[in-house]
């Protein structure tokens, strides 16, 4: 890889990381629990980060999905695909380099994505102070 290509790859990864952290903060603002940002790019190669959060009700998942879509639109990103929105048990938002998983507690426990991707690094993050 040329130095220019390496710099571009690092820049794209940094942008993906910032997008993932912004998504985690939206979930925090929506009062989601157990929010994880997982760097999966070395394993998956089609996406750089997963953001996983637990909501308390289908309406909360749908509301957070709408807020994420709005936030991404403001920052120049977009949702490329959305699955599970109608059912509201597990809503998946494909944002290109970031995939957001909004899950009810029972779905999160059943599918156990945290354990499935347990070998991948977790990204430390903090909610923004008001």
Image (cartoon, rainbow, N blue to C red):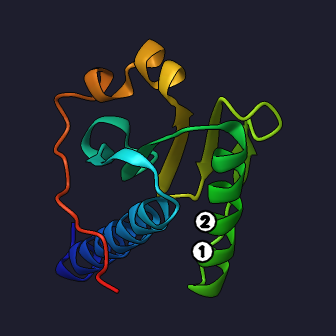
Indicate which disc residue 114 carries.
none
Q: CA distance from mark 2 to mark 1?
A: 6 Å
Residue 125: x %, y % from top left: 22, 64
Q: Say whether marks 2 and 1 touch (CB < 8 Å).
A: yes
- Compared with 26, 91 (above or below) is above
Number of disc labels: 2
- From the viewer's side, name the closer residue of 26 and 117: 26
Residue farthest along the right direction in this orientation:
86
Image point (52%, 61%), residue name: 30
Image point (35%, 74%), residue name: 18
- Compared with 3, 103 (above or below) is above
- Compared with 66, 46 (above or below) is above
Residue 33: x %, y % from top left: 38, 45
- From the viewer's side, name the closer residue of 106 and 37: 106
Residue 118: x %, y % from top left: 21, 28
Q: Is residue 126 rendered to the left or right of residue 110?
A: left
Q: Which residue is mark 2?
A: 68
Q: Which residue is mark 1?
A: 72
Q: Secondary structure at mark 2?
A: helix
Q: State which quadrant residue 40 falls in.
A: top left
Q: Secondary structure at mark 1?
A: helix
Q: State which quadrant residue 25 falls in.
A: bottom left
Where's the N terminus, which quadrant? Answer: bottom left
Residue 48: x %, y % from top left: 37, 53
């Amino acid at each position: 890889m040329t130095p220019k290509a390496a710099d571009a790859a690092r820049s794209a990864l940094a942008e993906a990381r910032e997008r993932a952290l912004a998504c985690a903060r939206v979930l925090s603002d929506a009062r989601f629990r157990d929010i994880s940002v997982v760097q999966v790019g070395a394993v998956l190669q089609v996406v750089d980060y997963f953001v996983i959060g637990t909501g308390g009700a289908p309406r909360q998942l749908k509301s957070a999905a709408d807020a994420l879509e709005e936030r991404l639109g403001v920052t120049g990103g977009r949702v490329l695909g959305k699955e599970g929105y109608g059912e509201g048990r597990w809503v998946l938002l494909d944002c290109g380099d970031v995939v957001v998983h909004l899950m009810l507690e029972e779905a999160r426990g059943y599918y156990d994505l945290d354990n499935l991707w347990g070998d991948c690094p977790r990204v430390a993050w903090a909610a923004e102070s008001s």
